[in-house]
């Protein structure tokens, strides 16, 4: 794997407001986990930030209520060497010793419960479960947010042991290795919900180099009948892949629906 010289996440920013569009529109922080560099530093140490941000990689709220884990190249789940929870962000460290690809995940986080409703032609929302909705309202949606953010870091040559699917919740399963992407090449992947392919699922990819203040996806795609999609990544840089999906919640959940959010931070290297 060729080094990404000069590409560090603190040097690049992604300014966008993430729209959660299930039955109504809600503006919210975007979950992420991102390494300072996509190759380990001295003695294999990897440092990452995790949180919720409106300006990407500049966390406003720490990623709490999740379970940070690392999937090793051998396919084993282990805990990070260190996790520090601050008010505005979480910081992780892990020392990679085995060559290959490591998967870093926030773990699935069950978040706030939202109710969307319409009153006198105006759409409103509340996240207070004790709030009594006003008379005459029309309930549009009732869901709990479910977030998962991931990234991959490779020590020397990429490997595939950490790319296996969970077959639970909303997830992206790489077909093209996410640490072996070069400008002008195709990034191919599958999108699953509880292990089943998602058909016609929108995918948005945002560029960290976009500093316009009106962030728009650099690339978009839609999954096919097999739940697969592909994107030609024309430019080198740091990217955030974003998925969202509303689906019925399992029995016993706090709301009848889940509002799934999945993000993947990854890098595209200059063309060979």
Image (cartoon, rainbow, N blue to C red):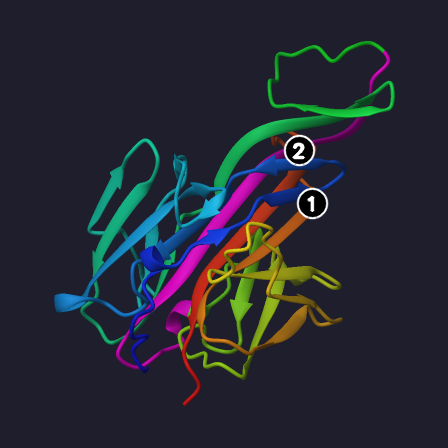
Determine crowd level at label 1: few under 14, some 14-19, many 20+ residues with C-alpha closer than 10 A.
some
User: Looking at the picture, how far across and down is residue 67, in whole percent?
Assistant: 37, 43
Residue drawn at the location 71% of the way across and 37% of the way down: 25
Give the extent of the magenta segment. Answer: 136-162
User: Residue at point 87% right, 18% down?
Assistant: 120
Label 1 to label 2: alpha-carbon separation: 8 Å
**127 relative position to 22: left or right:** left
**Mark 1 or 2, nearer chain start:** 2
Q: Is residue 20 left or right of residue 209?
A: right
- Label of residue 246 in the image: 1
Q: Residues within 10 Å of mark 2 (few under 14, many from 20)?
A: many
Quadrant showing the N terminus: bottom left
The residue that label 2 is drawn on is 143
Percent position of residue 160, x then y: 40, 76
Viewer-closest of 190 and 183: 183
Extreme residue toward the bottom, this view? 272
Magenta region's main secondary structure? strand
Q: Quadrant of residue 23?
A: top right
Compared with 120, 111 (above or below) is below
Q: In the drawing, what numbered circle is on residue 222?
A: none
- Position of residue 115 measured from the top left corner of the image (x, y, whole percent): 69, 26
Please state which of residues 185 and 190 is positioned toward the viewer in this rendering. 185
Q: Does the magenta-highlighted stretch encompass residue 159? A: yes
The image quarter in which residue 180 lies: bottom left
Q: Secondary structure at mark 2?
A: strand
Answer yes or no: do the residues labelled 1 and 2 have beta carbons within 8 Å? yes
Q: Which residue: 44% across, 70% down?
A: 237
Q: Residue 45 at what x, y percent from top left?
A: 18, 62
The answer to whether one can see residue 76 in this image is yes
- 154 up-or-down from 241: above or below: below
């Amino acid at each position: 794997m060729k080094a990404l010289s000069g590409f560090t996440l603190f040097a690049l920013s992604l300014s966008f407001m993430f729209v959660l569009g299930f039955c109504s529109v809600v503006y919210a922080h975007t979950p992420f986990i991102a390494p300072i560099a996509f190759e380990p530093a001295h003695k294999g140490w990897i440092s990452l930030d995790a949180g919720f941000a409106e300006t990407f990689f500049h966390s406003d709220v720490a990623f709490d209520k999740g379970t940070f884990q690392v999937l090793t190249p051998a396919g084993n789940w282990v805990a990070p060497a260190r996790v520090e929870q601050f008010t505005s962000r979480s910081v992780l460290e892990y020392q990679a010793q085995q060559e290959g690809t490591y998967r870093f995940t926030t773990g699935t986080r069950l978040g706030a419960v939202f109710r969307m409703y319409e009153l006198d032609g105006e759409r409103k929302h509340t996240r207070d479960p004790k709030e009594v909705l006003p008379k005459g309202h029309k309930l549009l949606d009732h869901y709990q947010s479910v977030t998962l953010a991931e990234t991959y870091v490779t020590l020397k040559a990429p490997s595939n042991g950490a790319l296996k699917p969970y077959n639970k919740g909303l997830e992206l399963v790489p077909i093209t290795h996410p640490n072996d992407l070069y400008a002008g090449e195709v990034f191919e992947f599958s999108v699953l919900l509880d292990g089943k392919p998602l058909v016609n699922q929108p995918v948005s990819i945002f560029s960290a180099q976009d500093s316009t203040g009106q962030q728009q996806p650099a690339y978009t795609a839609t999954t096919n009948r097999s739940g697969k999609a592909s994107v030609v990544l024309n430019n080198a840089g740091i990217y955030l892949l974003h998925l969202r999906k509303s689906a019925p919640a399992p029995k016993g959940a706090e709301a009848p629906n889940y509002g799934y959010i999945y993000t993947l931070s990854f890098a595209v290297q200059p063309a060979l």
